[in-house]
Amino acid sequence: MRHKLNKAIPFKIQKSQDHAILVQVDKEAYFYDKLHYHPEIQITAIVRGEGIFYAGNSMTTFSEMEVFIIGADIPHLLKNHRAYYDEKSPGVEGISLFFDKFSFGKKFFDLKELAEIKTLLLTSNRVIKITGASKEAIYQKIIATTSKNSDDLIIAFLQILSLIKKAEKEYLNNEQYQLTLDEADGSRLNEVLNYTFKHFKENITIEQVIHIAHLSRSQFSKFFKLHTRKTYIQFLNELRIENACVLLTNTAYTIEQICYETGFKNVSNFVRQFKKIKNTTPSDFRKTMSI
């Protein structure tokens, strides 16, 4: 099921007030790729599909069996790789659980026994990617929720939260993200992000981007920094490096080929930016991923 929206944000989850948790299964050619947010906390398992996950003010690659926790009111999107937009798309599938801090009553997560889970939910605004040995167990528990009745779903949901609490985690945002977007700013940012996702391999200029945003250069600089906590060039470089990581992991391309394939003009700058963002070189990253 995919929600149909004319505007990018906000995003309304069709969750009945009579149910604490919504389980949503998305099966499409590609994931919903417009920037959006909602007041519910979201736990998502990627069953099929690859691409770039953008949330808050950070991004990472996603692929099968990834699990993410997205806090309330965090702007986010899943942008699949180009092959998913072709007629012969391999297709995607994701399972998401939506709930809020009052799903079980206003005081439920204030119980002493749930103190660590409450802390987990509070830190979900940093956006969490599950890593380590527990990831597969959490992933399988989320998959299993699609066949649960109401009573069993609540038990399974609490078990998932308990596993997440103990699991190794990667926080995508360095600090708690605070929403500053209104609908107009969200639509403008959405246009800029989607243009960048589509054309990152090309020689994008600031003039092109400010034309899309309908802002002056100085206005755009302030606007983009306010909503992403980084400059546009920083964002573009991060996007290119995340795509480079995919090529380093999944292809036999040389470092030089990957440099030009991801939009960099020379290898020395590519290596410098890669090391700045990933704290390692492209060659060492490839070696680590092949172990």
Image (cartoon, rainbow, N blue to C red):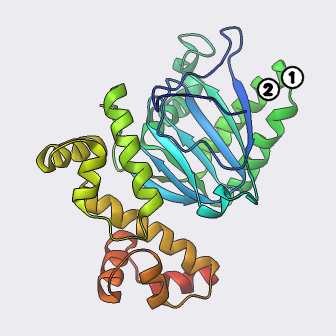
Residue kind at label 2, given as amino acid type: Leu
Marks 1 and 2, how far apart at CA: 6 Å
**Judging from the image, what secondary structure is the residue with disc 1 in?**
loop
Vertical placement of residue 135 versus 278, above or below = above
Residue at the spot x=69%, y=56% of the render?
49
In the image, taking residue 141 as reference, residue 229 lies left or right, namely left
Vertical placement of residue 241 versus 196, above or below = below
Residue at the spot x=51%, y=73% of the render?
245
Image coordinates of residue 50 in percent, x first then y, are 64, 60
Vertical placement of residue 176 versus 283, above or below = above
- The residue where tag 1 is placed is 149
Q: How many marks?
A: 2
C-beta proximity under 8 Å, tags 1 and 2: yes
Residue 128 or 184: which is nearer the viewer? 184
**Judging from the image, what secondary structure is the residue with disc 2 in?**
helix
- The residue where tag 2 is placed is 153
Residue kind at label 1, given as amino acid type: Asn
